[in-house]
Amino acid sequence: MIKPFPFRLACCLLFILAPLAPARAQLVSPWFRGPAQSWKALKGTSFSAARLSATPLSLPMSGLSTGQAVKTTVPNWLLHRLSHSNTFSAMEKEIFKKHPANTVAVTGKLSYFWDRDALLAANAAPGEINEKAFARHQQLLQHTLAEVENFSLEDISTQFHSSVFSQEEMLRALKDPTQPQAFILTRREVEAFPQLSLQEQQDFARNAWRQSSIRLMELLNQEPQAISTQAFSDYYYLKLRQRYFITLFQVMTRAQAPRQTIIVRVRRKIPLNFLPDADQLLTDAQRLGKLHFHLGLMQSRGQQLSAEAVALKAEITRQTELYHPYALAEAFGLPYEQVLRSHVYNANLYFSEEESARINMLTSEQAVNELPAKIAQVQAHMRELLDAKTTSPEVYVHYLRLHAREEFLLTRLAQAKFFLQYRP
């Protein structure tokens, strides 16, 4: 029979010493139900390039709507979302407590742990996963990532630097997560890519995808406690690059000729069901052109105050804010980067070299005298398209070109009148 005092002493010693021992629950994800040696084996075999390519991983800038939003600050929100004792390990919680105000590092940590556990679970044996706990773990990480991203777009945009994208353009890009984030491209990549042959461009896209995956794998292979805050920020950056180059590679596998730009865009629908062919996937220029075309049709019929016209105007405002430089570049057949670098759009963008030179040489008096006729000519072409009632993506792009020229000429005329009015 055990004597009472030694037994109580043993319990006290165990209580005191237990926190000093590296408890398995602190390091092993709570969803794992296998033995310790299986967890160790999993960590040794799960992070390979092949598994990284084969396993669906978290998407940076997913645009996911979770129904919740950061209420005060990112550190407070992390504490609120990730404090579930049965969902996250003590090691994960401890890492999230470090530098919680560094938004890019936080997004990198959320992406890292989502990817890490997705790869571990994909390699686990049957019966080693508590499916409910795993789903809860991944959902919380995914939702928190989306919530932090949505709350911190402006802060995230200041953490990246680009030779092509201004800070304003990077923020514009981040507001539409469905589009590949081209601001992660380097100056050398942007300038060198158009000079390559088709085969070289395809090889470049494949190698860039592979290199970003290898660098991600190197971080996943490290113990989470050994990864620095800067490395977690790098992880998020690498995720953006990996996602971009996967898209570029997919585009290049279908390409029949070399691209004149490395910047790629994704076709999207217009979210207005009353428009014809509402489910049609369109490019930036096609979407904006279609919106302006159908607004012009309504205005020509005296329906400018209808609910549909109001909805069209609101969507034009939204899409112009997000896609205007891309739509202009596409409509006038220019590389995206050329228009993105031009913060002020001059006549060279909208007209031929000869015509733009003539417009640029006009004095204010000449502009007031000559531009009204040119504006009327552009407007007549727009009416011809509306009267024909022929709709197609090509017609929409042509209409957008005319609309852009009209806006430029009207602005140039207004400037000339202003200068004349206040000229001494």
Image (cartoon, rainbow, N blue to C red):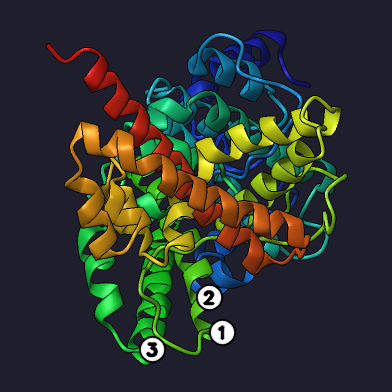
Q: Which residue is mark 2?
A: 251
Mark seen at residue 254? 1
Mark toward the start of the polypeptide (3 vs 1): 3
Query: Front-most of 352 and 44?
Result: 352
Left or right, 136 with respect to 42, comes to: right
Q: Which residue is mark 3?
A: 198
Name the amino acid type tagged 2: Val
Instruction: Give the position of the N terminus as an image quadrant.
Output: top right
Name the amino acid type tagged 1: Arg
Question: Is residue 87 visible in this depiction of the protein?
Answer: yes
The CA span between labels 1 and 2 is: 6 Å
Q: Measuring from the top left, give residue 334's x and y in whole percent.
A: 37, 64
Left or right, 63 with respect to 40, comes to: right
Mark toward the start of the polypeptide (2 vs 3): 3
Mark 2, secondary structure of its residue: helix
The CA span between labels 3 and 1 is: 11 Å
- Other residues around mark 2 within 10 Å, as few (<14) / some (14–19) / many (≥20): some
Query: Front-most of 135 and 238?
Result: 238
194 above or below 232?
below
Left or right, 159 with respect to 129, comes to: left
Task: Verify CB contact (< 8 Å) between mark 2 and mark 3.
Answer: no
Mark seen at residue 3? none
- Other residues around mark 1 within 10 Å, as few (<14) / some (14–19) / many (≥20): few
Name the amino acid type tagged 3: Leu
